[in-house]
Image (spheres, coloured by chain):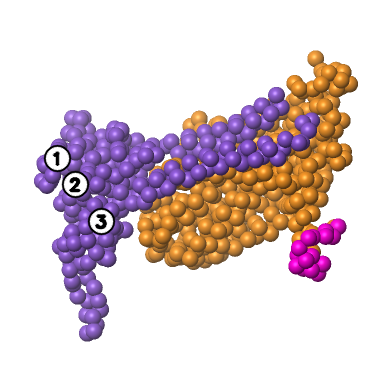
Chain colours: A purple, B orange
Amino acid sequence: MRKLNTLSLGLSLWLGMIMATGSALAAGAGGKITEHDWSFSGPFGYFDQASLQRGFQVYREVCSGCHGLEFISFRNFAELGYNEDEIKAIAAEYEVVDGPNDEGEMFERAAIPADRYPSPFPNENAARAANGGAYPPDLSLIVKARPNGANYIYSLLTSYTDAPSEMDVPEGMHYNEAYAGQMIAMAAPLYGEDVDYADGSDTSIEAHAADVVSFLAWASEPEMEKRKRTGLAVLIFLSVMCVVSYKAKQYIWSDVKKA
Amino acid sequence: MQMQNFKNPVVNWIDHRLPVFSFMHHELNEYPTPKNLSYLWNLGSLAGFALVMMIATGIILAMHYTPHVDHAFASVERIMRDVNHGWLIRYIHMNGASFFFIVVYIHIFRGLYYGSYKAPRELLWILGVMILLLMMATAFMGYVLPWGQMSFWGATVITNLFSAIPFIGESIVVWLWGGFSVDNPTLSRFFALHYLMPFMIVGVVLLHIIALHRFGSNNPLGIDVSGKQDTIPFHPYYTSKDLFGLVVFLTIFASAVFFYPNFLGHPDNYIPANPLQTPAHIVPEWYFLPFYAILRAIPDKLGGVLFMFGAIAVLFVLPWLDKSPVRSGRFRPIFKVFFWLLFADCILLGYLGAKPAEGIYVVLSRLATAWYFFHFLLVLPVLSLIERTRPLPQSISAPIIGGMAMAGAAAKREKPDA
């Protein structure tokens, strides 16, 4: 009875904290979000490398015109399943500014795997000037930087429709049901069949969106697979230790007379 | 303190000149502890563990972090991506802050329920409230360091509170910022203070433990230890129990760190700080939400700040507000009800702190704030005068009133109130 009281006190304290926290974070974005089934969600989540490579292709051929990926280096693409030569070849397609050289001049050279992925604009002002005043955000953390990130971006990419007739869409804006306020400066980036996949897989707008979101989820949390795998081992170890330490405690306490 | 005779001659030689081993034996080994402590008494050692864990991970993070507005955000991402196991160290530190507060809040509510703040433990309690204040300051400054959107805007909102102080408020804010807005000088000093304050906490924790060991732990019955038959040595009994509690804590903590590391955080803090763009809702970390709700409940800025700090200040004088001689809520039928109302009130305040300050939320915030102060300033003093408490057991060892009580003891005790 007394034990139960204590237990319920402890548990309700705990649950109270968790509930308060959960509701604190439930505040959403306001657009219509569709839930998608991701290979990388859940405790056994993993990245599908083929999808990551296709997503990278979509990013490269569509998104990278306006959106940077500043925290990703070419060497990181090893995690997408590319080998060293392939990475060198990908990097060599880009020019980066290096220097100063012995004459004190900055110069351009082909990128190497150690270089960061080059951003499309030199700074935010240049990006805004080229995009009608709107700033295309860097995408390296975008999945983590939005509530329900993966589903949100997937929905955003697939929710461009014609505005309802009573709604007035201003010049330079676009109607998108997933976006809070429904008016977004970014024009629809995907229509389906935007990119030719080498592996001949589905090129519908949904497939493109799912692939590029997988790629961006990887860019946001490249440690995810390792983290979850380590976590499973840690939890198995701790569960065993729970039993062991509880038994040890029971054994030690066996000579204490209960009041 | 009695000197021990140790088997190891080297230990004995040192102990004779520097009695650290006798001290440890006295305070950690034979230290007599009430034998009826429940698992709620595990939270103290857990808080100590959390503090050490935060300092250890924090020192490693500081080796890789750059406290500059142009580099802070990128340096955190470098830790996450390029430093060996940097993601693990940062996620432990980030979630560790939340879990430290969970542990400490349970620890505090345990103290509230079982009257652990009452004589002769008033200073022990006050030192604890000081630790809470230091923790809040440390956590607030730590949240600023990654220099994301919530870091920046949280820092702006909270430092601006000081401008409510009449006459000198504006000057104080400029002094805190080291400039005319939250900027690089603010970040560097927050980093320096964020590194300093945990060690101040360690100092107060040591005082907290010294004060604790003066009279020993309170216990679920809230009655004093009456003799040797009521206590057991700290080691191996409570060391083994604390170890089990620690493993359970680590299991829950690891689930968060490895599987939901960003659940307790805010997505906006993965957007680099931008002084020109205010986030739609500026919310503090969850552990500040009840105080944030109190702050916003008061329509006047200075009043809000005073009530917010008052919510902590009232805890400092709690030992003199609740004068009931009975410590444990178990024997205080009316107090018990009000305790749970206060608990629900704090949860409600936390919920309201996360909601926008509009409509029904404002009304509820005001009611909940009023109830918080009503509880401490009116309910507790009045209850200590009028409440009829249930009879206390004679000692910890004696059979105890309750479901398992033996027939003899049940006969001895007075008739409970109808």
Amino acid type at circle 3 is Phe
Task: Determine if the magenta segment contains residue B8.
Answer: yes
Q: Which residue is mark 3?
A: A77
Q: Nearer the viewer, residue A196 or A39?
A: A39
Magenta segment: does it hold A3?
Answer: no
Q: Amino acid under label 1?
A: Ser
Is residue B145 visible in the rendered image? The answer is yes
Q: Residue at x 53, y 36 (%)?
A: A18
- Which residue is identified by label 2? A54
- For mark 1, give the secondary structure: loop
- Provide residue B307's location: percent of width, then percent of height: 63, 44
> Pointer 1 indicates a residue of which chain?
A
Q: Secondary structure at mark 2?
A: helix
Confirm whether circles 1 and 3 share one chain: yes
The residue identified by callout 1 is A201
The answer to the question of whether label 1 and label 2 lie on touching residues, with beta carbons closer than 8 A, is yes
The stretch of residues the image draws in magenta is B2-18
Classify residue B270 as left or right of residue A58: right
